[in-house]
Image (cartoon, rainbow, N blue to C red):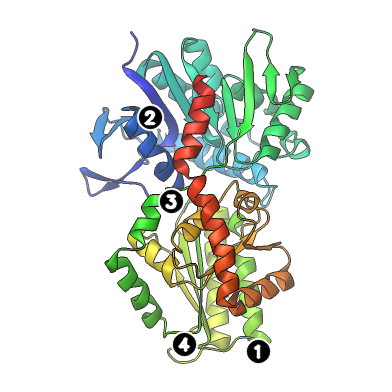
Amino acid sequence: MRGTSSFLIVANRLPVDRVGEKSWRRSPGGLVTAIAPVMQRRDGAWLGWTGAAGEELKPFDHDGMHLIPVPLSSMEVEFYYEGFSNATLWPLYHDVVAPPIYSRVLWDAYKAVNDRFARAAADAAAPGAVVWVQDYQLQLVPSMLRKLRPDVKIGFFLHIPFPPGELFQQLPWRRELLEGLLGADLVGFQRPGGASNFVRLCRKMLGVSAVKNDIQLDDGRTVRAEAYPISVDFGELDQLVRESHVMARAKEIRAELGDPEHVLLGVDRLDYTKGIRARLKAYGELFAEGRLKPGEAVFVQVATPTRERVEEYIRLRNDIELQVGRINGEYGEIGRAPITYMHQSFGRDELAALYSAADVMMVTPLRDGMNLVAKEYVACRHDLRGALVLSEFAGAADELRQAYLVNPYDIDGMKRSMMTAMQAPPHELGRRMRSMRRRVATHDVDRWANEFLTALES
C-alpha cells in the first residue's frame, strides 16, 4: 500500500505549536518560514513530531498544510533528541564549542527514531514522490527510506554547519552517518565548504570515487553534494515592516527604552553557539571604559527559550542572567539600564518592529550554518538605515559582505566594530544596506527552494 503524498517534507518537528488543548499555530522558526510556503504550493504533506512526549495523533490539516505526526516517547526525547542530536551532533558540528557526548545508548535511540521516521515516510509517499528530509536529527533517514522505497526521489538538507574531517572523524558512528546521507540523490549544505568536507570524507572513509561534487556509488547511483544557502521571504518582510502598526510599534519601542541615541539588538535562540556572552562582555567593557554612557545606548537582547531541560543550556541561561544583572548594576542609572534582556519568544510583527527600531543589529555566533536573523534584519530595513555587525563564522557572512564583519572571539575587535557601526554616517549605512538588500531580495527563500528542488528532480 502506497501513500498519496507526491511531495513530502520529513523534519524532526511539525511546523506547528500547540495553543491550549486542541488548537495549533504555525511555528515561528526559520525552517518553517522557509519551507511551509513551498509545501503549500505543491499540495504536499509534512511529517514530524508534535513536540509532546508520548502523544499519538492521527494526520490532520492546519493552515493549508497536511500534517502527519510521528510519536516519540519521553525516553526517546531524552536520548534521541536531547541526547544524540543535541548533546552529540550539535556541539560536534559547531566546532566543539561544547564537548560532545559519545554514548552507545544515545546512538541506539537515534537509530530507532530515524527508522520510525523512514517507515512513516515510506507509508506516506506516493509512487515516484519527492521526499525532502531536513537537518541533523534525521541523517540516517535517506538510506533507510531508500531501502524501503527505491522509487522515490530523496533530497536532504543540512541546516547547520558540516564539520571538517578532523572533527567528524571523532564520531564512533561516522561511517553510518555518511552512508545514511548517501541514501539521498541530492545532499544540500549551507556553504560550499560543508559540501567539500562531506565529499572528502566519503572518499576517505568509504572509498567511493567522486568527480567534483558528484559521488559515484557501487550500486550505480550518483549522489550530488552542493551548497544551497537558505534565505528568507524578502517580499513578505519588506511589506510587513511598512505597515502602519509595525512602524508605530517601532517608535513606541524606542520611547519605552528612553529614546537613547543608539539601540543595539540581539535576537537569538538561547544557545552557546550564538556568542551572546561575548557580545555582552564587549558591550559592558564599552561602559567600563567610558566610551558609552547610561542613556546613550541600550542593548536589547532577546533570548528565545530552547532545550530547557539540557544541563548545558540551564547553565548558559544562569550565566547570561548574572552577566546582564552585573552590567546593569554597575553601569545603570535609575530608569536607564544599559541592557534590556528578555528570555521569551516574539511574533513576527513584534520582531519586525524591533528590527526597525534597532540602529545596530548584533549577529555574532561562534559558528552558524546560516543565521536567518541577519537576513531578516536586512529585509526589514527599507529605510536604508541600520548597521549589521555580523560574525565571519556565520554562513550569512558569505553573502552579506557589506556588514561589519567581526571575529566573535576577539572582544576588542567587536568593541571597535560596535563603535564604528554606531558612529557611521547615514550615507555609509545606506550604501552598505542597499547592497545587502539587493542580495537578499534576489536570493530569497523561493529561489533557495526552487534551486534545490529543480536540481533534485532533474
How far apart marks 3 and 4 lie (CA) works out to 35 Å
Task: Return the x and y of residue 420 as percentages of the image width and height.
Answer: 65, 75
* Quadrant where the N terminus is found in the figure: top left
Q: Position of residue 451 (x, y in %)?
A: 52, 32
Q: CA distance from mark 2 to mark 4?
A: 48 Å
Q: Which residue is mark 1?
A: 290
Which dot marks residue 234?
Answer: 3
- Residue with the mark numbered 2: 47
Q: Secondary structure at mark 1?
A: loop
> Is residue 50 shown above or below 431?
above
Q: Nearer the viewer, mark 3 or mark 4?
A: 3
Closer to the eye: label 1 or 2 = 1
> Is mark 3 in CB contact (under 8 Å) with mark 4?
no
Q: Quadrant of residue 123?
A: top left
| Mark positioned earlier in the residue sequence (1 or 4) | 1
**Residue at x-position 49% and y-position 17%:** 153
**What amino acid is labelled 1 in the image?**
Gly
Q: Mark 2 vs mark 4: which is more N-terminal?
A: 2
Tell me, for residue 336, which label it has, or none: 4
Secondary element under disc 3, as helix, strand or loop, is: helix
The amino acid type found where label 4 is placed reads Arg
Disc 4 crowd, CA 10 A, few/some/many (<14, 14-19, 20+): some
Residue placed most toward the observer, 315 or 138: 138
Q: Earlier in the sequence, mark 1 or mark 2?
A: 2
Dot 2 lies on which element? strand
